[in-house]
Amino acid sequence: MNNSLLVVLIASGIAYGTPLLYGALGELLAERSGVLNLGVEGMMLVGAVMGFWAEQRVHAGAVLSLIVAVLCAAFAGMVMSAIHAFLVITLRASQIVSGLALTIFAGAAGLSSYLGSDLNLADVPAHHAFHAVFPSSLQNWPIVGPIVFGQNPLVYASWVLVAAIAYYLTRTRPGLNVRSVGEAPGAADAMGINVVKYRYLHVLAGGALAGVAGATFTLAITPQWVSGITGGAGWIAIALVIFAFWRPELCLVGAYFFGALQALAPELQARNISLGPTELWTNAIPYIATVIVLVLVSWRGARRRLGAPAALGVPYVREEA
Amino acid sequence: MRVTVERRLRQPRWLAVVVPVASLFVALCIAGLVLVATGHNPISSYRRLFDAAFLSNGALDQTLIAATPLAFTGLAAGAAFRMRIFNIGAEGQLYMGAIVGSAAGLWLGGRGGASPFVIAAMIVAGALGGAAWASIPGVFRAFFGTSEILTSLMLNYVAGYILTYLIFQSESYWRQTKGFNATVFPTGKPLPSNAEWPTWTLHTQGGIALPLGAGVTVLAAVVLWVLYRRTRFGFEVQVLGDSEGAARYSGVRTRRKILAVMAISGAVAGIGGASQVGDFSHALDGDPNGLQKQSYGYSGIVVAALARYNPFAVLLVAILIGGLDSAGNALQGADFPSGLVGVIQGIILFTTLGGELLVRHRVRLVRAAESVAA
């Protein structure tokens, strides 16, 4: 039963969807504060390379070195996002161009690849990696075994994070403040909320999560460093935020759906099932679905109702508000 | 003392030249710091880059090959961004131009058409392919108000998967199906010789091969400049870029204009795709590690931003960034840090963006008392 297509798809959808989820949650925090960051792919790659570097260099037990590696990846992602934050919040540069610049700077042909070759990380086996933590007797339970108990700790941490961010945004004072900063920065400023501080903090937090998303690749999914290892996952993460109407709990559903699509083509091939040009449509569906959702979301009043932050992408200048 | 930033009422013309040049210089300094921090000598790295880009034997040929697609995508990005229409889909539009353009070349060339006629048809087909692909986000933006930023971006990936599918995952018209190699490694069907674009050799310093595509970029730059600066259409589009409301109330048909700008931008990128096939690869390149790894569409945005969206400046900047690209390729491996070129390009974009602040705003130091009085 655990080998049935559906169970395998859900289980691997969760595994492949986890970096998308981390990236999307980070982007969601930034966007809720009104800052669009198109640099997710670049931040992820730098997180991926620095996480792997820390894992290689820290000579400690598996648990400690993996924790240090994840923290290092988060810090690296945060440093990358600080560039974007400074340019768009302080210097009021175009958020679109700055985010793209971040991806060009840090991405597959940029800093991440530079660091990877400079720190000699290519073709090196990982010392430690995140594995499933539950005993195999639990993992062999029908259905819930592979889906719930067969995952690595980063997956469980992401579940906690989804709940925490959902709680933060809807039930806490700072969380509500973030939303007001993203909706109406002028009004938030008049209420005494420090718009600049909130935007900085949430862009930085978003960068940290993007870094963790990258580390999910190099420390769990394929524990090694290859230039451009994320393969466009950062862009899917950005798409996912819109697909999920800017809600953390829907990000989880969307991430696993897109993750399962990634697993679908090889699974179908392994089972000799042919459904037309499988690779083409399983690869393209996340992007096409996002375009369709974008169009639906922008249809008249739907945009507001579905939760797009009203001030998304608009720089805030007190004197000109 | 306090730093204030105020909007300039008028922008001096000299700033438009000085700021990009200074941005470039600052970017090279910052990238130099990165090199020092990672234990490389920045002076020798830069000298090797410059040699490999412009001075060494055949370097200029390679630079022109890299600059041609960048000029196309830079013009495409500039044509849209100037009007505050953020078409970041030049990448996908270039693929579509390559697909449709090579189809025209294969079909008409295979039927033995005269070479100039076949090449002209490839240019038109490439433009149509790119324009059609760009019209998808264009229609969504014009009729549903959907932001073109993410839709055009998402379609880049779809176009990339279609490109790979045509060569690697199907037995399409574009794929070479005959011969021994075809069964080992999938490639595109080679263009017949009457569909290959000619090159001119400039007889200076041992001869520089000038591809037809490079000539087309100059022509495209002139056409774009005239269109935006000297026609009613260009004027209306600029009003639209400054204020959509003002444009609509003064009777500009905003939907048509948005669609037209997207289509023009896509057409230019599409010709770039046709030029890739006709000028250089002579077959559709569907390899995910080939054309798609070059990310000309994204680098074109760097080119356009550094050129401040001026079509003639785009040509110059394309040669500069193209030189950087081709030098990066030439020096790859050995002891040269890979990824350095992307790092430099990214930093150039960052400093250019920061520099924009100085063009649009005045930064002043004011005393506390003065700022209270103001």
Image: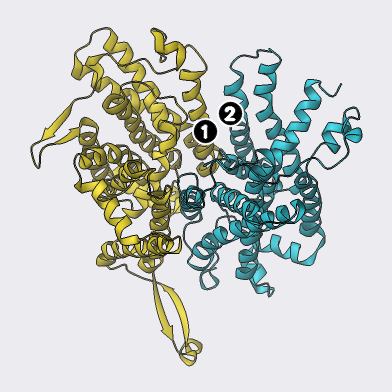
Q: Is residue B218 visible in the rendered structure shown here?
A: yes
Which SS class for mark 2? helix
Dot 2 corresponds to which residue?
A284
Percent x, y for residue A47?
A: 60, 52
Q: CA distance from mark 2 to mark 1?
A: 7 Å
> Looking at the picture, does residue B337 appear above or below residue B116?
below
Q: Which mark is residue B157?
A: 1
What is the display colour for chain B? yellow
* Residue in the picture at 8% in, 37% down: B203
**Along the line of sight, the residue nearer the viewer: A250 or A255:** A255
Examine the rendered structure and indicate whether residue B100 appears above or below residue A123.
above
As drawn, the residue found furthest toward the bottom would be B369
Q: Which chain is cyan?
A: A
- Amino acid bearing label 2: Ala
Residue plotted at (54% across, 51% down): A39
User: Residue at the front extreme?
Assistant: A59
The residue lying at 27 percent from left, 7 percent from top is B111
Kind of residue indicated by mark 1:
Tyr
A104 and A35: which is toward the camera: A104
Count of marks placed on residues = 2
Instruction: From the viewer's side, name the closer residue of B44 and B112.
Output: B44
Residue B120 position (above or below residue B305): above
Residue at horizontal 75 percent and vertical 42 percent from the top = A252
| Side (left or right) of B289 relative to A181 | left
Q: Are marks 2 and 1 in contact (CB under 8 Å)?
A: yes
Q: Residues within 10 Å of mark 2 (few under 14, many from 20)?
A: many
Mark 2 and mark 1 on one chain:
no
